[in-house]
Amino acid sequence: MGELVTVGNKGNGVRSDCYITLEITSSGGKELDLESRVAAMYGKDIRKQLMDILNHFGISNCRINVEDFGALPFVIAARLEAAVNKAMKTGKEYFIPELKGNQYSSSRDRNRISRLYLPGNTPSLMINAGIHNPDGIILDLEDAVAPEKKDEARYMVRNALRGIDFYGAERMVRINQGDRGLTDLEFVIPHHVNLILLPKCEHAEQVQAVNDKIRSIQDRYGQKNPVWIMPIIESALGVINAYEIASAAGNVVSLAIGLEDYTADLGTSRTTEGTESFFARSAIVNAARAAGIQPIDSVFSDVADMEGLRETVLRSKVIGFDGMGCIHPRQIKIIHEAFAPAIEEIEKAKKIVIAFHKAEEQGLGVVSLGSKMIDPPVVKRALNTINLAVKMNKLDENWRDTYE
Amino acid sequence: MKTGEIRMSKFDKLVTNAAGRVVPTVINSKPAVPFKGIGKFKPSGHKTAPPITTCADYPADGNKVVSSLKEALLKCGLTDGMTISTHHHFRNGDRVALQVFDAVNEIGGKEMMWFPSASFPCHEPLIKYLEDGTIHHIEGSMNGALGRFASEGKMNGLGVLRSHGGRYQAVQDGDVHIDIAVIAAPSADAFGNANGVNGPAACGLLGFALADSQYADKVIIVTDNLVPFPCIPWQIQGNYVDYVVVLDQIGIPEKIISGTTQITKSPDRLLLAEWTAEFCDEAGLIYDGFSFQSGAGGTALSIGIYFADILRKRGWKARFARGGSNKYLVQMLEEGLTDYILDGQTFDLEGVRSMRDNPNHVNTSPFTSYNYHGKGNFSSLVDIVILGATEVDVNFNANVVTHSDGLLLHGIGGWQNCLFGKTVILPIPLFRDRIPVIRDEVTTLCGPGELIDVIVTERGIAINPRRTDLIEKMKGSPLPIKTIQELKGTAEQICGIPEKPELTDEIIAVIKWVDGTVLDSVYKVKE
């Protein structure tokens, strides 16, 4: 006994977090030293919460020091549990109440135009993520977390899945590569995660390994809710095997590309024009379409360059992607706007859809607009455009009632 | 004179005022009127007047320059217990207030009342003079360390917080008698004419010092840029001035520029700004010829930019924008998106340049914009007013001076005066870290809820039930319109239900309403 462990963050600019120092002792009871920015309002609450968690783990003697920077209860719980597990083997977990509204599942073909990356060990960025209305949020356990913080991030991400309202965004987690990633699944699968991002995917077997693990965890918990997979292709080999990966399992719904690692693998670097990645991006789009799933583009890393982002998104749309990652909430709106059908596209699609319905009503086998015949794929694309426009609030659901 | 010989009753005779708040009716030994309700207190009598002076007592060559602040103060007849005023147009770059009290201390003056138009963190060194009795107490905003000092009950007298308009009213009505006004001037001539648009410490305008120049017994102009007569424009007229003192430096230029004049990069605040602008647009508050005021904070600046976008798109323009001016407002003026800037405080050098060069960028004072004991003022003519708050309660009452733990940390500024605008909107986060902003009851009442119309938070927008017109207009809006109770519930669901701060029953300051009545008391915090 007597090992001193620390978890959490402190220092300049740290908000909505806490820093815990814990030492398990053999006598003397629980000595708690709490220094909190919100002591006047929540001092009693915080003390009670800390004691409840220590009791849950059967700890009766310890010295604990908590520096609190306005951490919400789900954060305090995650930090203390991480500290306890760092100090001793408990074989137990401490679950904060799960928000009723967080038990939703997502549908296979829902919009995945924007998905916002949230570093898994930085709670201040998670709390308001949902209000910016991304299609999905990604709680990242991989590259956005420092290696020495990866264990404590698991508790934070699990508690975020249970305790944060993301206002209907699809709740995704990016796990680590290899065995660490499979252990990550233990922390998130039982808590209604909607989708798992699988980084640096190069073989279909990796998808299957993840799926086997998911299934065994779900069986243990008696859960049947769908958990979708989005493999991320980040290497030359991954690009070559893209179709095999995209069609590896029925729950693979999207195929994403990660360009930072891919360009490094090629021995080149990223440019705004993206000449170096054109082949890979096209290959991903092609593989995904062949497998009947969504192709998703990489992130745009300069958060200050909104014009550059807009151009990149428009190019991405032209190549055939259905969405893109975001690393800052300010990018969401621009990505939505650029991926949304343009007004002219919608107007054109409306005409075709009207003609399609007219042909159906009249029992005609052929759709025509003026003197032109409209091919079935064109009709299908027009219907997709209309659906997307409605989903993105660019068109009223009942537009046909007022169409002249 | 020894400390303690001036015996004062800090506060006495507590009553419950019309807002349900317990307030003293004796403040620093003088009688005070409790808040009666908005527009209910009818003043009587005449305005105060400074003594009659004669040109025979002033140099015919117009040269009122004396060698030092100390000499000027002595010539003004500095006596223990006097009221000395200074102003905040240099914000955190002010070097004058400290030099004034250094001189007072050197002379051996005691028990002064400092009457600043606002205080800033740069004034923290004055705490030593509050401790040694040079300064008895402060009537004016107490920010940061000074607020903490007062909150801990360490000030000898009771603090009195007034709005900018309330300060003008107090001086004009004789509630506060200024013995010596020290006015820092970026440019002045030897006669005492002065302005804020030229010189190394250029700050734009000197409106906060207008009342002091008109009503103080003695007026000292302090400058680091003495120009030959005439100093034009003469924002302060030398005919009110007794002495002129030239110092090496009166303000630190980079600190005169307010730190909050950049638009926000915070995505959460940008969302507040966007929703606020959308709300105004959907509610029909923006129209060709409308007017607005938005402050210097990052969120408020961004709202101004959204307003400008809307005007540009529609080919409209505002009739006037009420500043705090800054480069963004100046851009609007120069782009033709507003006819006028009515400026109360200039926040950056672009604002200073525009005020100096553009006749449509107008220098205003608390008399024209805010004074409640006048024959009207233009704050009630502004269509949209954007303000902040530290707390709001379920009845839309708001607090701007104390934090939820009871600490006094901010001044009122023009906030109370602006509440008289046609639609008052507070864009504020629903909680800061873990601290919910919407409470059952505000810690300190600074503005009655009947004057506050809309609260915009990142998790919903609440409209004051009194504004049935706005509620009607926003029916079917895609914006998340909620009740204030719903917003409070959301915050408490996320943060937990906060305990009320434990305060003592010792009053350390009072909040005056715009008409000089006492709106609320601020209490000493527990150790």
Image (cartoon, rainbow, N blue to C red):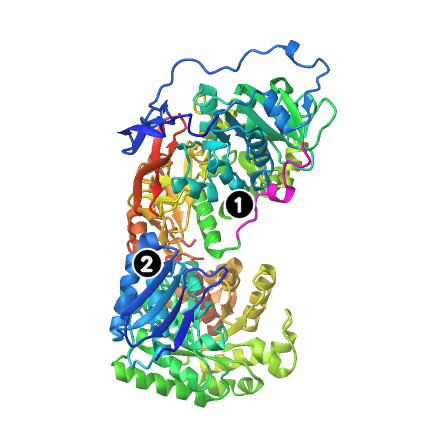
Q: Secondary structure at mark 2?
A: helix
A298 vs A342: above or below:
below
Tell whether B204 sits left or right of B142: right
Q: Is residue B235 visible?
A: no
Q: Are marks 1 and 2 in contact (CB under 8 Å)?
A: no
Q: Amino acid at mark 1?
A: Leu
First to last magenta residue range: B247-264
- Examine the structure image and report whether residue B251 is included in the region drawn in magenta: yes
Crowd around label 1: few <14 · some 14–19 · many ≥20 (10 Å) = many
Q: Amino acid at mark 2?
A: Ile
Q: Chain of mark 2?
A: B
B524 vs B343: above or below:
below
- Which of these two is toward me, A188 or A109? A188
For disc 2, the marked residue is B494
Q: Secondary structure at mark 1?
A: helix
Location of residue A208 in the rendering, given as x and y in whole percent from the top left corner: 40, 88
Main SS category, magenta section: loop
Residues beneath discs 1 and 2 located on the same chain: yes
Location of residue A295 in the rendering, given as x and y in whole percent from the top left corner: 49, 76
Question: For the point 49% across and 24% down, which residue is it?
Answer: B82
- Examine the structure image and report whether residue B330 is included in the region drawn in magenta: no
The quadrant of the picture occupied by the N terminus of chain A is bottom left
Q: Nearer the viewer, mark 1 or mark 2?
A: 2
Tell whether A234 sits left or right of B187: left
For disc 1, the marked residue is B301
Looking at the image, tell me whether mark 1 or mark 2 is earlier in sequence order: 1
Tell whether B271 sits left or right of A278: left
- Which of these two is toward me, A189 or B348? B348
Instruction: Check the image and name the residue furthest to the front.
Output: B2
Question: Toward which corner of the image does residue B280 lie, by quadrant?
Answer: top left
